[in-house]
Amino acid sequence: MRKAGRLRREGGKGAGAEIYYEVVGEGPAVVFAHGLGGNHLSWWQQLAHFAPRYTCVAFAHRGFPPSSPVPGKSAPDSYADDLAALIQELNLKDVALVAQSMGGWTCLDYALREPKKVRALVMASTSGALDFSHLEDAEVSEWIHRAPAALAELQSRGIHPAGGERLAREQPALAQLYWQISEMAPASFREEVRVRIRQLRTQSPSLLAKLAMPVQFITGDEDWVFPPAAGPALAQIAPKGRAVRVPAAGHSVYFERAAQFNELIGRIL
């Protein structure tokens, strides 16, 4: 099965926006939520891999083309509601959620609201709205201290921070594609979204203890957008938490090391 569509939000918070989505494959449902540097196209390597066995849904968050444009300063407030409406529209049951970076705000919020509807949650390079600075972890604290300078250095060299230095050096074609997908959304919009999701990152990591489903954290060891050590620390809080740190990978493991990423989430699916 393959289809594309637009979900128009008619009522409640965030009404009026249209959410673009694509569905491919058949089987248990898996919904992929992209990060700030992406849209539905970001998951091309995952959809091709999982479609023979799963119903794969990839969508563009509101404001990210081809979904309808909205103010970035308010867009994240409706992300979980949009996901809930999409799951209802497609009549998906017992879904697995795969969240990359910004998508973690979307999927974690939904999982906390509707835990009985989620059979598994993958948090890739993200803690969503959970404030990882509350973790008592020396490596996380050191990362927080060093990250601003490291990100500034990447940007000064024209390297996408979410792609990383290794992707740019070893896989320049993929790095170029990453930039192209990222720039489909206006830079000013992405910056407003970045500011807003950071404002929303205030919740206690202890909320993970409420999630009974398997929760897997995946981080790249060379990530300067999200602390690699935060994944294992957070996984200890979830009753069925697990974590993997991927060597020689940056923030976007799903894009840079797709085969390894697919194998990891295949285990939890």
Image (cartoon, rainbow, N blue to C red):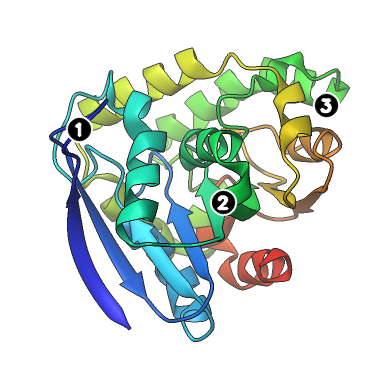
Q: Mark 2 is on which residue type? A: Lys
Question: Toward the viewer: 192 or 71?
Answer: 71
What residue did someone put label 2 on?
117
Crowd class of label 3 (few under 14; some 14 to 19; many from 20; radius 10 Å): few
* Mark 2 secondary-structure assignment: helix
- Looking at the image, which residue is at 33% across and 29% down? 78
Q: CA gap, disc 3 to disc 1? A: 44 Å
The answer to which of marks 3 and 2 sits earlier in the sequence is 2
Where 236 sits versus 75, above or below? below
- Looking at the image, which residue is at 42% across and 36% down? 80
Residue 39 in view of the camera? no
Where 132 sits versus 155, above or below? above
Looking at the rendered image, the quarter that the N terminus falls into is: bottom left
- Looking at the image, which residue is at 20% across and 33% down? 11
* Mark 1 secondary-structure assignment: loop
Q: Mark 3 is on which residue type? A: Glu
Residue 73 in view of the camera? yes
Q: Mark 1 is on which residue type? A: Gly
Task: Nearest to the eye among marks 3 and 1: give it.
Answer: 1
Task: Nearest to the eye among marks 3 and 2: give it.
Answer: 2
* Mark 3 secondary-structure assignment: helix
What residue did someone put label 3 on?
139
The answer to which of marks 3 and 1 sits earlier in the sequence is 1
Q: Position of residue 245 (x, y in %)?
A: 77, 50
Crowd class of label 1 (few under 14; some 14 to 19; many from 20; radius 10 Å): few
Q: Position of residue 239 (x, y in %)?
A: 84, 41
Name the image quarter holding residue 3.
bottom left
What residue did someone put label 1 on?
11
Looking at the rendered image, the quarter that the C terminus falls into is: bottom right
Q: CA gap, disc 3 to disc 2? A: 34 Å
